[in-house]
Image (cartoon, rainbow, N blue to C red):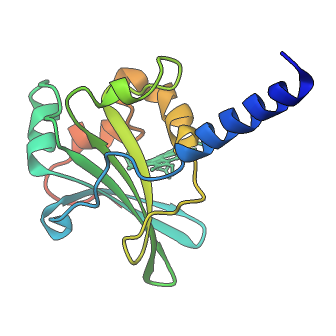
Amino acid sequence: MSFRRFVLALLFSVAGWAAHAESNRVEFPADLDKLVHYTTIRRGEVTEHILTTSEALAAVKNGQPIPDGTHFVLVDYRDGKVYRYFVMQKGPGWGNDYDEVRRTADWQFQWFWADESINMDENTARCQSCHTARAERNYLYTFDALGAFDGAAME
Ligand code: HEC
């Protein structure tokens, strides 16, 4: 390959990678206020409410797989206002959109701003890479709080 072609190939692969930063299959949950707030995490000025569906909560309690379509939402509040939403959603075969190295089973990740628009500057491979450490717990950091949830969101 000539140097020029090499540079072009490199540019295209970088452009291809950047394209992954854009929208994927995750949709902003239409029923956000129906989701259950099962735990709260505070980090300095940031308060995080973690939400999911009552069906997902029941599934985890009963040792069943989390149903397709399930959303998990981390609502990031700063100064009492929503700053952003981190969303994970699962769907049938969604893992096939990514190569094996990146894949987080059938979960996909997205960053939405307070107005529900996608943060196009984020590469969600970063989300997947960190959540991979939790592969044994459905890729969830707050998995244990799901099982412990008794109807009142833990602080
Ligand atoms: C460096 C590691 C890291 C990265 C990168 C990361 N997360 Fe997380 N995520 C966490 C941790 C840790 C928690 C538990 C909440 C906490 O401790 O703040 C969490 C919690 C969540 C939750 C609540 C469900 C759960 O797993 O408990 C969602 C949804 C979520 N993250 C989505 C995202 C999205 C979307 C991105 C990318 C835009 C992302 N995360 C990037 C570490 C990470």
Relative height, residue 23 to residue 147 (above, below): below
Give 152 or 4, whichever is nearer the viewer.
4
Relative height, residue 85 to residue 63 (above, below): below
Relative height, residue 17 to residue 30 (above, below): above
Quarter of the rendering containing residue 93? top left
Quarter of the rendering containing residue 108? top left
Residue 55 percent location from the top left of the image: 8, 44
Could you tell me which quadrant the N terminus lies in? top right
Give 68 or 117, whichever is nearer the viewer.
117
Residue 65 percent location from the top left of the image: 16, 26
Residue drawn at (15%, 65%) of the image: 31
Residue 135 percent location from the top left of the image: 41, 23
Residue 9 percent location from the top left of the image: 74, 29
Could you tell me which quadrant the C terminus lies in? bottom left
Q: Is residue 39 left or right of residue 119?
A: left
Give 151 or 4, whichever is nearer the viewer.
4
Q: Is residue 125 left or right of residue 118?
A: right
Residue drawn at (60%, 67%) of the image: 44
